[in-house]
Amino acid sequence: MRKSLMLTAISGAVAGMFLFGQVMAADLKIGIMVPTTGSEATSGKDMENAIKLAAMEINEGGGVLGMKIDTMTGDDACDPQQGTAAATKLVSADVAAVVGGYCSGATLPTLKIYGDANVPFVIAAANSTKLIDANMGNAYQINSTGFDQVATAVALFEKKGAKKLAVVHQGDGYSEDLAKLTREKWTAMGNEVVAYEVVNKGEQDHSALVTRIKSKAPDAVFWTAYYADGALLIKQLRQAGYRNLIAVGDGSNSPKLLEIAGKAAEGVYCFSNPTVDYLPAAKEFHANYKKTFNQEPDAYAALAYDGMKLMADAINRAGSTDKAAIIKALGETTSFTGIAGPVSFTDKNTLARSNFVTLIAKDGKWALSE
Amino acid sequence: MSIQDILLQQLANGLILGSFYALVALGYTMVYGIIKLLNFAHGDLYMIGAFIGFLFLSVLSPLIGDSWVGILCSMVLSMIAVGLLGVLIQRIAYQPMLSAPRLSILITALAVSMILSNAVMAFTDGEYLAFSTDLGYEGLEFGNVFVTYTQMVLVGAAALLMTGLYLFVHRTMYGKAMRAIAIDQDACRLMGIHVNRIIALTFFIGTSLAASAGIMAGAYYGSIHFFMGFVIGLKAFTAAVIGGIGSIPGAMLGGLLLGLLESFGTQIPFIGTEWKDVFSFGILILLLVFKPTGILGRTEIERM
């Protein structure tokens, strides 16, 4: 027992020396927190790649304040406990700032760790509204939250001249939240929600629901849950002769929805986070990414890339690597434009505009609407 | 839509839903009738039917298209394949357990159910497969009530299969043998009836009916999933109990009735469509308490 304690102490000390040595050697150490193992590893590694690509480009252009960026990855494995461990590792390695955050659940507990250490943190993808309350002022969300999706959705319905809306969700936290927020906003604008319905997960036959919706004659139907069941609902709505607008939330943003619903999906609207495919400004990034990593960038690569660029921009504006100064500079961001669009923040450190894009199904593919 | 329109539309919807329930319930009731086994793997055979039909359709569609001809061909092939699978399951899993206590064979059925659904899950990675068929949305409009041709064909096909089964059971020697086995197996053996062969035939017919419902549901709804058999298996069980388990006309009646009850029940104000399952299983509980023999069932029922 005593022997193993000794061993632990020695190895700890050695590891500490090793880490310390690395810090001394690095110019500007930036932490990346993403899941590189576990179920979300694909998306996490993709974000890591994008961040590293941004860092490489910055280094080629002379670095930040004359220093070269050196990245260090902490694996949160999309798990709250692993996330805590990853954040502790990055903080004790004394990184100047952290970019990343994919899973909201894993990112949430790290906010306190980064907050206590006052580390500037750009949250690239995670967008639960829960992150807003847990933020200690040092973290900035550059991906839009659920509130923004509602704003984008409601704007589309209004533009299409809808008055009566039907909202359907699946009873899980995510889709119910989106449905509830939409209903609140839509009625607050003086419009009517004629049907507010729930369906069971995995239900195949929606005929009863379709009859109910049809009998209320809505101008638009908004499905807030996931693609597999959404495709069936769309199909059955069209089959029953419902001809008005149908829109689906970002949980249904999948080519699979179009595959299952087939012809019925033509003209269906979908709200999506800004992914590379739909960003006109991402062409160059897309090509570079493919050249460097020999694969296609995934959904959140663009935001991760923007996150690193934004951090470098803030450090440049701060003029030093002092953490408080960087955080202040991040908050004052006004003229930064990433490939996903311009960035500025609200007083709650969330993105000031909705970065959701509206897609439309055309010839069996999602395309940018208008 | 006026209230009459809603009710009429739901009548049509209920008939479609009920046809699926009835087709699956038939297999349940036939197997129960002949060896008193609640075959809980029955819903999974419905699911397998859809997947095998999907396989056949993707092989055949370059040759004969994915419209009615293609669906019909793959349906027949899938019914045969799944029917044989049903016989195989009966031979491997149920035959050795026939003289064991009833609980053992019931647990075996649950195990078969899990093996089937997990095997499909492993093969498909738990993904939804899109059943891409070329069925249009054309149909007839009666006032505000809209019924597509596809829906009419589905109900027609189900009715045809059920009539065929009824005639088979009541007009052929095989059917007579089935009914006889349901009454007394040992006496049948003494009379020179190949009991095991007839039991195998019953499994073949029962599971191929479930497979036909599976592929029809796949083509109609448009997606298939390894878990799709679970709820419909329970619903079919409910339908069989409503009609009187063991009785073939009872299963047809129970299936249609359950479909209609769900369709109309979910239109009651303040009861959302999410209560659909609660509605059917609530009825199951009430029925088991107050009339466990079902509508067409008697205590001394002539099964089949």
Image (spheres, coloured by chain):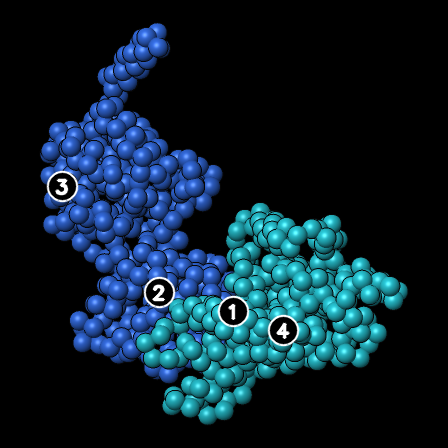
Which circle marks residue A169 in the picture? 2
Which chain letter goes with mark 4?
Answer: B
Q: CA distance from mark 1 to mark 3?
A: 60 Å
Give above or below for A362 relative to B114: below
Q: Measured from the top left, where is residue A330 in percent x and y?
A: 15, 41
Most foreground residue, A238 or A293: A238
- Whether A89 is drawn above or below A303: the answer is above
Which of marks 2 and 3 precedes in the sequence?
A: 3
The amino acid type of the residue labelled 2 equals His
Q: Which chain is blue?
A: A
Q: Amino acid at mark 3?
A: Gly
**Which residue has dot 4 on it?**
B299
- Residue B246 at x, y = what percent? 66, 70
The residue shown at (87%, 63%) is B190
Give the residue drawn at x 37%, y 57%.
A251
Of the residues shown, which amino acid type is indicated by label 1? Leu
Task: State the CA–CA distance, disc 2 to disc 1.
Answer: 33 Å
Q: Specify few, some or many for label 3: CA neighbours under 10 Å numbering under 14, 14-19, or 20 or more.
A: many
To which residue does mark 1 refer?
B288
Please state which of the two labelled residues, at mark 4 or mark 2, is closer to the viewer. Answer: 4
Foreground disc of the pair 3, 2: 2
A275 shown above or below B1: above
Report, in whole angstroms, how far the alpha carbon at label 4 lies from the one at label 2. Answer: 45 Å
In the picture of the structure, the residue carrying the numbered disc 3 is: A137
Q: Residues within 10 Å of mark 1 (few under 14, many from 20)?
A: some
